[in-house]
Amino acid sequence: WWRAGEATACQFLSAIDPRCQEDAAVFWNFGVVGTEFEKKNDIYFWNALWVCWVTTSTAGYGEITPTTHVGRFVSCCIAFVGLWCASLLTAAFANSLTWSQEEVSAMALLERETAKQHAKEHASSILVFWIRRRNGRGL
């Protein structure tokens, strides 16, 4: 079913559409002389799994693709190593963004000192307001 929507669906034995008798339904043509390829539907479960793996691993469809099971196994192993390296790099970067216990303690100390400074400024403005109010100068 994974290829049911593909343009080569005319290659299915159950295809009865009259357009399937046209040359365009049997051959790929890229507009350049000598670039005509026969369309093939190699409906095979492992090929379907291969397409799913290549798509989800973001390995892409290169110009050189393995066609044997051993080659695909090696490619899968290499894709796993690539995904592992990418996740390791991401984990290392995320770990460098987290704060150590000393940094957390220093940040708490800075926040306490900032809060003390704001409290002193607020207290001094209250005292200035109270003194002005007492002397009758108002605000």
Image (cartoon, helix red, strand yellow):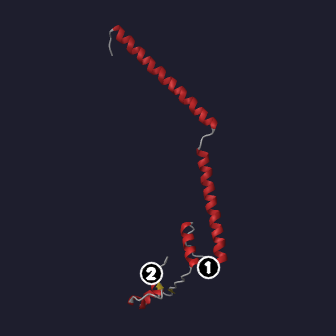
Determine the residue positioned at 64% across, 59% down: 85
In the image, is 24 to the left or to the right of 95? left
The foreground one among 85 and 56 is 56
Circles 1 and 2, Cβ within 8 Å, touching? The answer is: no
Residue 59 lies, with reference to residue 115, above or below; the image says below
**Residue 79 in the image: above or below residue 9:** above
Amino acid type, label 1: Thr
For the C terminus, the quadrant is: top left
Q: Earlier in the sequence, mark 1 or mark 2?
A: 2
From the top left corner, tell me how far across and down residue 44 is, in percent: 56, 81
Whether residue 133 can be seen here: yes
Would residue 92 be found to the left or right of residue 5 on screen?
Answer: right
Residue pointed to by mark 2: 7
Q: Secondary structure at mark 2?
A: helix
Where does the image place residue 102, in percent across and percent down from the top left?
Answer: 64, 35
SS for dot 1 = loop
Q: Is residue 136 above or below residue 42?
A: above
Q: CA distance from mark 1 to mark 2?
A: 21 Å
Residue at the disc numbered 1: 67
- Residue 63 picture location, percent across and down: 57, 75
Name the image quarter holding residue 89. Answer: bottom right
Q: Is residue 30 visible?
A: no
Amino acid type shown at disc 2: Ala
